[in-house]
Image: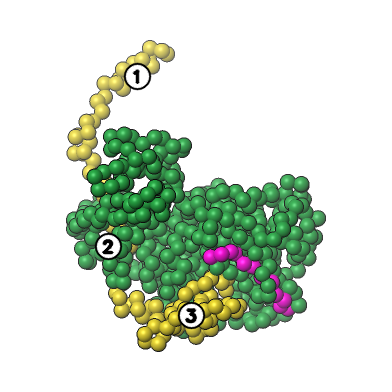
Amino acid sequence: MARKAKSTKPKSTKRPAAKAKATSNTVMAWQDDPISKLPLIALPVPTLAKAPLKLRIKGPAVKPGVYDVGTPQFRYWNTAVAVRRGADFWAPLLGVTRWQPGAVLPVGLDEGKDLNAYYDRTELAFFHDTAGGKTVYSADSPDVVCHELGHACLDAHRPELFDAPYIEAGSFHESFGDMSAILSALQLPSVRAAAMSGIKGHKSSQLSRLAEQLGWALRQLDPTLVNRDCLRNAYNTFKYVDPQTLPDDAPATKLCAEVHSFSRVFTGAFYDILCGMLKIRSKSPKDADLVVVATDAARLLMDATTAAPVQPDYYAQVASHMIDADTARFGGKYRSTLTSTFVKRKIVPPQAVRALAPAKGKAATRALGAAAAAEAKPPKPQIHTVKLSAKDLGLGEGMLIVDAPAEQKPFPMASAAIMHRNIDTTTNVERATARFVKMLVARDRIEKQPQTRSVAPAEHGRHPRTHALVQTAEGMKLVRKRFDCGPCC
Amino acid sequence: MAKSTRKARATKSVRKAPTRTRRAQTKPKKAAAPSVASRLPPMTAEKAKAAKEKFERGILTRGEAVPEGTRLPPGATHEIVGTNPDGTPILKRKRFSLK
């Protein structure tokens, strides 16, 4: 017992920053957590106001420099590099240019007494408190910072999840925070080097252990609150159980229907998948392979969260859409690890992936394709004319007409999204259309000058504009002009 | 050397590229794999209602919700913004917490 306490006490935060190498263009920062055993490193001074996902630390700006660990100045730059690293990783994948709170996301470094951190749609808020005779600041841990940033990123990408009244939706938000901490940490070459053996060997590592220091502090107050070596560990064996059957509260060693506790099921699956993806990519993986795998895993998460309907079985929805996204985006390259992990963790029922299991080799793929074609009934296409306020979208005055085709799948094959009775199809189509048009506006993919159908849209920078506004007898109409299959679409 | 290269080129050009129709006949079209998402058990209104009730009960049991306008204490994430006709409180998320 005494040995454990000795090994986990956060001594390392006493290290003076002056010992590490730094120049005038660099600042010092922790790599993933003050007590993860990874030393301080010098990193380039980040630009918080960098578009598209701009950030601002509340209070007076601190001049870049080398400051002692534990000082507010050190905390400022330690948080700045972490939050910038996370936002730079997610920005190209999210497909958004704004946070939910606005163009700039404020960050409060020390908002008072609490061993916690929050994202509340106005800011990221970090706190401090004393435990075991030591004052711990949550902003000192890049793991914590990138977890909270993950909430803000997912909220920008999928705002419907914020107030979804389901345990699995809230738990996924928490899991996404932890996955964001893992993926953001992997953007540092030194973290990749340290994490490689853990991922290759599929074991607990600095990477899988989230927020060691805050976990230590909470353990001083109540050892049952958190993991024995961190706040939460992505290397775990928790399997999916219907949260309806779980107690509302339980010690950290057990699973319960509380969102942080239940998040460990999905995060555990994600860590398993990350290890599996690296093995698939290379039998002797190098640093570059880990970079690719981290980005591929994030892309699958983005694709899945875009497509998965927000409903009680959200874990199964995201997991199954990740498998489908892998088929669509990577030709099923990571299918074996995705399906085996999600089935082993009981997140996806085996019958849902049974048709995919024998799909190895060309003959099997052909047979599978033929079977799917025979099973699939032709969908019933319906055109919904959706009218949106052009002014709200910044596209001029009056109404914007969008023809939205909707396909209704026959009952046995209908996705759970369509089976969700709370929202009728028309409302779904209208929401989806509004969301799609907003996305087009945000990405500047609409040729804004009304024109005749025969005129092709002008090229615009790297990506051509895919849609145009056409003046028709009914009014101003949005029409697709082309598909852009560039690498960033 | 140059001669042999020309010869090789000439041989290559003799080969006829298969026409679009022929290619279509010989190579079966790759069909998309069935969607895993579409094979999940359907969600029902009853299940959704029960899931919502369980979620809200947990929030209230753990003291994670406070009346609207009250400063959120440590760990609280929701506000009680009203009451349903059946007397149950209406919850609204105000923030996500790290733990």
In the picture of the structure, the residue carrying the numbered disc 3 is B80
In the picture of the structure, the residue carrying the numbered disc 2 is A426
Mark 2 residue crowding within 10 angstroms, few (<14) / some (14–19) / many (20+): few
Residue B84 magenta-highlighted: no
Residue type marked 3: Ile
- Is residue A38 or residue A280 the one in the foreground? A38
- In the image, what residue occupies the spot 60% across and 55% down? A55
Residue type marked 2: Thr
Residue type marked 1: Ala
Residue extent of the magenta highlight: A121-132
Q: CA distance from mark 2 to mark 3?
A: 31 Å
Could you tell me which chain the residue with mark 1 belongs to?
B
Residue A277, percent from left and from top: 47, 55
- In the image, what residue occupies the spot 45% across and 63% down? A159
Query: Of circles 1 and 3, which is in front?
Result: 3
- Indicate which disc, 1 or 3, sits on the residue closer to the N terminus: 1
- Residue A481 falls left or right of residue A378: right
Chain (green): A
Which secondary structure lies at badge 3? strand
The image's mark for residue B8 is 1
Res. A186 image quadrant: bottom right
Query: Seen from this angle, which residue lies furthest bottom?
Result: B87
